[in-house]
Image (tube, rainbow, N blue to C red):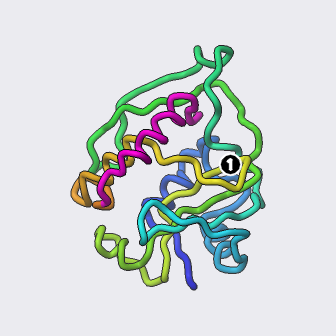
Amino acid sequence: MSIVLTPFARSRLFPRDGRATAIRDCSDTEFEQYLNAHPPLEVLPGYAPFCVLHVHRNWTSTRCSVLPLTDQNRHLLRSAYEARSREELPVLVRWFEGIEPPQANYLIPILYSREQLAREGSPIEADWGVVGCLYTLEPEEIPMVPITMMRNALGVDEGGSGVALDRTAYRRAVAFWEAHANWR
């Protein structure tokens, strides 16, 4: 099995602006090489048949991407309308500022099949393409952000995958994200 970083993931996981939420102590090329040289501890099913998640013990100093919302940190929560790319419409996002989360124990790359990426207009030569990565304390998937589930349901033209909304999964994600936020 061969794995490559998609341009979308490369710009989000290894941004040129040096943001603290990037993958640390590892270049994009080294990350890709690591994924191809080291089998995952576990393979988790994704939200659709074309998606899988590979659980790897964190070999970097990358920090957890999500923190619980508490009375002590609620005042550090920020929000804005943002788009992930020039082509996408901005959506409301929220994050913590001024918090340094713990080092993640696991890096969990999110992989899409070659066929799905071609369908989305991002063809690759490898079997799988990394579209994102979760940085977690536990070897478990973090629920997809609800707006990403909606974007996926809108289809490829709106930056999604074309997978219909699963109302039960959506409600689980809302419950999680009401009590958690990303950080910057």
Using a 10 Å C-alpha cutoff, classify the residue at mark 1 as few (fewer than 14 neighbours), some (14 to 19) or many (20 or more). many
Above or below, 151 relative to 180:
below
Q: Position of residue 9 (x, y in %)?
A: 49, 60
Q: Quadrant of residue 160?
A: bottom left
Q: Secondary structure at mark 1?
A: strand
Residue in the foreground of this view, choosing between 19 and 129:
129
Quarter of the image containing the N terminus? bottom right
Q: Quadrant of residue 161?
A: bottom left
Q: Identify which residue is drawn at 38% across, 47% down.
A: 148
Q: In the rendered view, would you say 15 is above or below 69?
A: below
Residue that appears at 48% across and 56% down = 11
Nearest the viewer among 65 and 20 is 65
Q: Quadrant of the C terminus?
A: top right
Question: As drawn, is 165 to the left or to the right of 33?
Answer: left
In the rendered image, the residue lying farthest to the front is 168
Quarter where residue 101 is shown: top right
Q: Label 1, on which residue? A: 136
- Amino acid carrying mark 1 in the image: Thr
Residue 37, how many percent across, how many down? 70, 80
Q: How many marks?
A: 1
Residue 140 lies in the magenta-colored region? no
Spot occupied by residue 44 in the image (x, y as percentages of width and height): 59, 65
In the rendered structure, the answer to whether residue 26 lies left or right of residue 29 reads right
> Residue 113, image x and y in percent?
44, 75
Residue at 55% in and 54% down: 13
The span shown in magenta is 163-184
Residue drawn at the location 59% of the way across and 34% of the way down: 183
| Front position in the image: 29 or 139 | 139
Q: Is residue 75 above or below residue 121?
A: above
175 to 38, vertically: above or below? above
